[in-house]
Every structure is written in structure tokens, then in C-alpha cells.
Amino acid sequence: MEQIVEKYINPLTDFGFKRIFGTEFNKELLISFLNALFEGEQEIKDVSYLNSEVFGANEVARKAIFDVYCQTVDGGKFIVEMQNAYQEFYKDRSIYYSSFPINQQGRKGDWNYELQPVYTIGILNFSLPEDRNNPASLYREVKLMDIKTHEVFYDKLTYLYIELEKFNKTETELETMLDKWLFVLKNLSNLMSRPAQLQERVFTKLFEAAEIAKFDSNELRSYEQSINAYRDIKNSLDTAKKEGKAEGKAEEKVETALKMKIKGLDLNLISDITGLSIEEIEQL
């Protein structure tokens, strides 16, 4: 097996995310994170885990597999998902997933259609396309809204999205519990010790659960498989970004050369400045 040099697991891996947030033994961590998200708007005292593999209404209907699926004591249902790479229909998938806990609340016989709240939480290790040039779009809360009055039309269906790549606070800048949780999610695998700013009791449990040296052989094997899958995704994304930048620079060169050619500048001068060949410039 490959030797792992990190002291703590990477929470952005499938294994790491579920170990921290998806087990009964560590549900205190999930409760703390959810309460940090709502920042006092509501208090979650306990959760019970539900089957994360949810099937449609019949045998031919599609199924959904959630990272974490739980229910609060008052009946509210939470889907918590870690997503490392953008997918073209990510929003569609998010809405589709929320339909399962809604549909599950249907009852046979007499029923007044009253529903318990449903929350879909996406921790995104990327930026949504419309937010890529907006560094302030770290946190997005979405509800059904009347577009004329801008008032919430239905408050029992909520989508929370955190664009984790935009969180750049250092240890000394952590203020709220949400700051601390986002710092942990983004930096845990790079730490060699527990930062002084994370002194709350819940983080004591977190660092104990995340220490790789305490894994048994099966846990270690599962984590190795998960970290390798994460690295494959990350390397593919990094490569795509580099290729995209290179393509963008090439397009800039062509655009610059064309403008210079239109202005009547010498082709040799244009070639020296842009790096394009005389033949390439003549074809513009």
C-alpha cells in the first residue's frame, strides 16, 4: 500500500467527508457544522441518519445516492453533498435530489399535504459559472421567491451552496464557527497539529477522528483508494485549467496580431511581438 505522509485525512475525499459527517459516532460534528451554517437562525440539537441510497417511486425510477442524508428531531430533512468538480447539470441534479425527501413524505389515505422542511447543502470545491468572477459569492442561500416582491414564497425548501475554493482566511482571521469549519474542510490534510484557534470541544473530536495513524488496515485501504480517486479528479481539473489558459493566450495573440495588421504594421514586427509566424499572420 502507498505510504500516506499526511497526519490527517482530506475531508474533500469521499472517505474523509463521510468519516467526519456521515457516521453515528461522529454526528456531533455534523450537528456543529449545520448549526454553523445557520448562524443562530435555528438550532439543531440532534439528527438521525437516514438511508443514503434512496429509490424512486417505482422499480424503473432512478435512484439517488447521497453523501449524507439525515433528519432532525422536528422532522426536517438534510442532504449534505461534497462536490469536487463542476458538472454541466449540477443545479438540475441538486433540484432532483431534493425531490426524494419531498416525495417520501407523501402519505396514503387522508393527508393534508403538509410537508416538513427540506435542505440541500452543497459544499462545492469550485465556483458556479455565474460566480467565477465574483470573489464575494462564497455562500449562497436559495429559496422559492416571488420575483416581483422579492419575498420568500415558500420557506420549507432551501438550497445552501458554499464555493469552498473562495474561502481564503488564515488561522488568525477565523472569527465565526462557519469560518472555522470551512478552514478545516479546506486545510485539514495540510495540518500537522491542531491550530490554537480551534479550541472548541467539537474540534477535539474532529482531530481525533481524522488522525490517519489511528486507522485500522481496512480503513487505511479505503482511504488510500479514496485519496487516489480525489487526486485523479484534481489532476484532471488542473490539466484542463492549464490547457484552457494556454488556449486563451493563443487567442489573445491572434487578436493582437489582427489588430496590428489592420493598422498596417510591418508583418515582421507583428511576428516579433506576438510570436506568430509570417504565414499565420498573412492568413488572418
Image (spheres, helix red, strand yellow):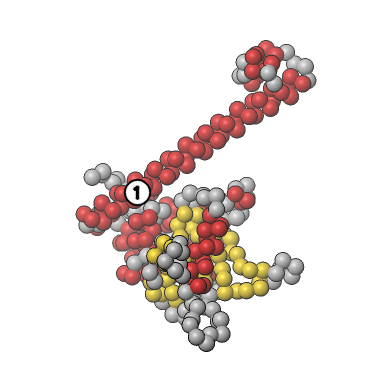
Give the quarter of the image for residue 65. Answer: bottom left
Residue type, label 1? Ile
Q: Position of residue 145 (x, y in %)?
A: 67, 68
Element type where label 1 sits in the image: helix
Question: 260 or 281: which is nearer to us?
Answer: 281
Q: Residue at x 39, y 65 (%)?
A: 53
Within 10 Å of disc 1 (Cα), the crowding (few <14, some 14-19, many 20+) is many
Q: Residue at x 63, y 68 (%)?
A: 144
- The residue singled out by tag 1 in the image is 227
In this rendering, does residue 129 appear at all? yes
Q: Where 145 sits versus 241, above or below?
A: below
Q: Where 188 sits versus 109, above or below?
A: above
Please state, as top left, top right, bottom left or bottom right, where the N terminus lies in the image. Answer: top left
Q: Position of residue 106 (x, y in %)?
A: 50, 78
Q: Residue at x 48, y 49 (%)?
A: 85
Please state, as top left, top right, bottom left or bottom right, where the C terminus lies in the image. Answer: top right
In this rendering, does residue 169 appear at all? no
Give the quarter of the image for residue 279. Answer: top right
Q: Position of residue 19 (x, y in %)?
A: 34, 61
The residue at the far left in this view is 217
Instruction: Please state the total of marks drawn on the protein image.
Output: 1
Question: 52 or 224: which is nearer to us?
Answer: 52
